[in-house]
Image (cartoon, helix red, strand yellow):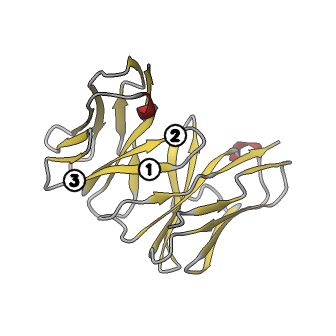
Amino acid sequence: KQEVTQIPAALSVPEGENLVLNCSFTDSAIYNLQWFRQDPGKGLTSLLLIQSSQREQTSGRLNASLDKSSGRSTLYIAASQPGDSATYLCAHHTGNTDKLIFGTGTRLQVFP
Amino acid sequence: DAGVIQSPRHEVTEMGQEVTLRCKPISGHDYLFWYRQTMMRGLELLIYFNNNVPIDDSGMPEDRFSAKMPNASFSTLKIQPSEPRDSAVYFCASSLQARNQPQHFGDGTRLSIL
């Protein structure tokens, strides 16, 4: 069974800190990996998508890396702000299907 | 630019009743996905469509669940009869491609079966 684990499950930090969220997956044949953000009572918003041939993607203060050999991806958030408070989920497509496998999520709170 | 629109946002009903959830995808998106989110099981794919045709419904939990997409701008997820364990948040998402483009999610329907 393919599993996607995210550590930590919850994180509370003061604003301004640089953060690293972790995502581990067991499928060695992933097609790509995505990071999403989910605000309370809302749907998911796609943040970054990394193809399996890529090592990282950047968008503003966000940087996501992918290491297929070790089955890991990290989301780096620079200079965190209270507006970054949300749940962050990683997900990947397997090699031969269109199905997204989601991680368990990290609930982030950034306080002023 | 309108995103994915789901209705209703909240639904509370008694077990045994029929429940119909609705979704309007983003115009031009060929793929539509139905997900269910619970605390215990996280986010699970129920079914997805390509050009209005169901491609994979292996995530549909039981025969009580059915989904249709009569045209490119509308899809429904129906539960009949509903049970308390169906209580969850149901999301609809759409995308231009199945894998190389991100999925755009609606705000979900919070379903409570009493």
**Label 2 close to label 1 by CB (< 8 Å):** yes
**Can marks 2 and 3 be said to lie on one chain?**
yes
Please say if B98 is above or below A33: below
Residue annotated with mark 1: A45
Q: Where is residue A111 in the image (x, y as percent from the top left)?
A: 45, 20
- Between B9 and A5, the one lying in front of the other is B9
Q: Distance between the residues labelled 3 and 1?
A: 24 Å
Q: What residue type is labelled 2?
A: Asp
Cα–Cα gap, marks 2 and 1: 9 Å
In front: mark 3 or mark 1? 1
**Taking A63 as reference, is B21 above or below it?**
below
- Quickly name the residue at label 3: A29
Whether residue A104 is visible = no
Tell me how many marks there are: 3
Give residue B59's position: percent from left, percent from top: 53, 57
**Distance in Å between CA atoms under marks 2 and 3:** 30 Å
**Secondary structure beneath disc 2?**
loop
